[in-house]
Image: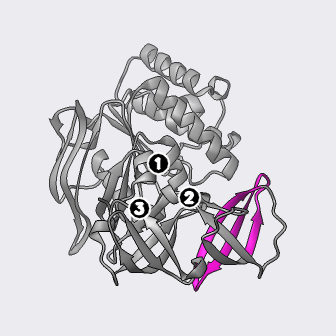
């Protein structure tokens, strides 16, 4: 059943429209991630679910109840912020128990809830410490524990890992995924990091300028992006885009021209070929991981600008014609900057977009 539902939600600050009509629904126990660039409205949308921002228009319901104008305390949601917001003079136990004491719960129940949350997060040994004696990852666990003890209907996370270093971010991603699996709770998570979105989400909501660009599973968004924005945002490194011209189009195949193609053009098999006419401008999308060196059928000739040794693989930054092209190859090929690279393309991983950036499909 639908557990969280947003219907044409809008938000204005004065005359400025920030959320321009967002609709989506989440099932009970689902992990939904809002992702998008800075300023797209994802944190504002999360705060509207929490009741920390007023809804200008639309309807918001949780567990079948209309909470559009409900007070935050009555929504049964719990929010984990980017900053840990721990009380520095209180112990970990007192920080986690504070909200329960404000709700006037019995001490026995408070203690039981805090100890259970501490067990889940493996911070039992930290309960008597003050926040200043904790690492960043430990503080984030305490902030999450403060949410767990409230037994909310929905957990809301507003970029909770952005203050952590790279190693801790990876560790905490795993911890949050485990937490979701163990609790089976509905979670809504905001991030600008598409790696977090891909690894954590059951479904991703891609936002841009206050509007939803696409909603789907990580696999759906990666394999079938609806436009160049989603295609470029989902995947790391981002998808390469070549602005090309169609020189011939037939049943199931088309020929496209671009200076990066060996011989100036390539023939692409696509069920969308019937929708494309000769002379049209289209964008050819190629993911870095779908390009290969040392192939017997090279289709791109690129010039190496710089390479990055990643240990088990190498990332090449190249130029094709006048456009940048990134590729990832296994191992550590010894190729100097300025050299030409003949590169193959995985034929079943070529993406086509029209002049407006929309995906071309059958």
Q: Alpha carbon of mark 2 to alpha carbon of mark 3: how far?
A: 20 Å
- Disc number for residue 230: 3
Indicate the secondary structure of the residue bearing disc 1: loop
Q: Residues within 10 Å of mark 1 (few under 14, many from 20)?
A: some
Across and down, in percent, residue 291 comes to: 61, 62
Whichever of callouts 2 and 3 sits on the residue coming sooner in the sequence is 3
Vertically, is 294 above or below 167? below
Magenta stretch encompasses residue 308 = yes
Display colour scheme: one colour
Q: Is residue 226 above or below residue 124?
A: below
The location of residue 44, given as percent across then percent down, is 33, 58
Q: Are marks 3 and 1 in contact (CB under 8 Å)?
A: no
The residue depicted at 64 percent of the width and 80 percent of the height is: 319
Q: Residue 40: in sight, yes or no?
A: no
Residue ID for mark 2: 346
Give how far apart the Cα atoms at labels 1 and 2 are.
42 Å
Q: Main secondary structure of the magenta part?
A: strand
Q: Residue at the spot x=32%, y=60% of the render? A: 361
Which circle, 2 or 3, is nearer the viewer? 2
Kind of element beneath mark 2: loop
Residue at mark 1: 81
Residue 103 image offset from top left, x and y in percent: 34, 29
Of residues 244 and 49, the one nearer the viewer is 244
């Amino acid at each position: 059943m639908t557990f969280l539902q947003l219907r044409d939600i809008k938000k204005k600050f004065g005359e400025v429209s920030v959320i321009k009509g967002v609709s989506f629904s989440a099932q009970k126990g689902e992990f939904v991630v809002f992702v998008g660039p800075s300023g797209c409205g994802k944190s504002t949308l999360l705060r509207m679910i929490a009741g920390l921002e007023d809804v200008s228009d639309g309807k918001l319901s949780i567990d079948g109840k209309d909470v559009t104008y409900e007070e935050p305390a009555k929504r049964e949601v719990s929010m984990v912020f980017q900053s840990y917001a721990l009380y520095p003079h209180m112990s970990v136990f007192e920080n986690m128990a504070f909200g329960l004491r404000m709700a006037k719960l019995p001490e026995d129940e408070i203690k039981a809830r805090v100890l259970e949350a501490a067990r889940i997060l493996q911070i039992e040994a930290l309960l008597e410490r003050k926040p200043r004696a904790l690492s960043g990852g430990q503080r984030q666990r305490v902030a999450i524990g403060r949410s767990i003890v409230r037994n909310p209907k929905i957990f809301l996370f507003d970029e909770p890992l952005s203050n952590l270093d790279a190693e801790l971010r990876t560790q905490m991603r795993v911890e949050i995924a485990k937490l979701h699996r163990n609790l089976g709770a509905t979670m809504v998570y905001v991030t600008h990091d598409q790696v977090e979105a891909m690894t954590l989400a059951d479904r991703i909501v891609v936002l841009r300028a206050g509007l939803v660009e696409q909603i789907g599973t990580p696999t759906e968004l990666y394999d079938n992006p609806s436009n160049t924005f989603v295609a470029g945002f989902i995947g790391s490194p981002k998808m390469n885009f070549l602005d090309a011209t169609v020189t011939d189009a037939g049943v199931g195949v088309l020929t496209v021209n671009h200076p990066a193609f060996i011989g100036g053009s390539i023939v692409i098999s696509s069920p969308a070929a019937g929708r494309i006419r000769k002379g049209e401008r289209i964008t050819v999308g190629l993911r870095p991981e779908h390009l290969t060196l040392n192939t017997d059928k090279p289709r791109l000739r690129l010039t190496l600008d710089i390479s990055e040794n990643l240990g088990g693989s190498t990332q090449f930054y190249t130029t094709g014609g006048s456009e940048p092209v990134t590729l990832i190859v296994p191992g550590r090929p010894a190729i100097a900057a300025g050299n030409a690279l003949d590169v193959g393309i995985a034929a079943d991983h070529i993406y086509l977009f029209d002049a407006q950036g929309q995906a071309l499909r059958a």
